[in-house]
Amino acid sequence: MFTGIITDMGEVVGVDRHDGGARFEIRTAYNLSGVDLGASIAHSGCCLTVVSKTDDRFTVDVSNETLSLTTLSQWELGQKINLERALKVGDELGGHIVAGHVDGVGELISVKSDGDSYRLKIRVPRPLHRYIAPKGSIALDGISLTVNEVEDDVFGVNIIPHTWTYTTLSQIGEGGKLNLEIDLMARYAARWRETV
């Protein structure tokens, strides 16, 4: 489990695509002596397992299933990605509960400055739009955000300067793709309603 509070921007420094999926090598500022092999780290919202590490980089294996449902299939050398280590009992829950299970890929359709902040509009693939509500939570590329407004399959968020500077959102232009994870409570509430 994660909180959606990004603690490092890593860089993809190795890419090995093969029939069974892919292996990525990630450079990080994390002190990897405290990261065990088998540890979970969220990579732009996608929970992946550390399979090897050195002083400042680690590798993860990605299945074809994950590549087909996320933006990871587009990762290239030099790409920056949002990183968050797994939540520990007793840690501050600054965002919202994020599982690291990407539900779909959204499209950034507009970016507008609003004072010191930025307003983003994102189009969501159907039927995920049913799970997004004003003032609800959503994770975009692993970042915990509050939904401002929803109109059909488009929703808006406001990005404060800190988030704009210390995550990859400032590097994604209009038409760019973002990993989406809907709020767990919305997912279960919708499932309960479907089965009543």
Image: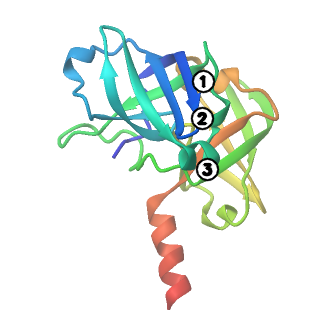
Marks 1/2: CA–CA distance: 14 Å
Q: Compare residues 24 and 129 and report the one nearer the observer.
A: 24
Q: Which residue is mark 1?
A: 168
Q: Earlier in the sequence, mark 1 or mark 2?
A: 2
Question: Given the image, on which type of amino acid does mark 3 rest?
Answer: Val
Q: Residue furthest top?
A: 55
Mark 2 Cα shell of 10 Å, populated few (<14), some (14-19), many (≥20): some
Q: What mark, if any, has residue 72 been given in the picture?
A: 2
- Residue plotted at (23% across, 37% down): 91
Q: Residue furthest bottom?
A: 196
Marks 2/3: CA–CA distance: 24 Å
Query: Is residue 65 left or right of 177 when viewed as pictured?
Result: left
Residue 74, placed above or below residue 153: above
Question: Given the image, on which type of amino acid does mark 2 rest?
Answer: Leu
Q: Which residue is mark 3?
A: 147
**Can you give x and y, in whole percent of width and height, for residue 98 in the image?**
42, 48
Marks 3/1: CA–CA distance: 18 Å
Q: How many marks?
A: 3
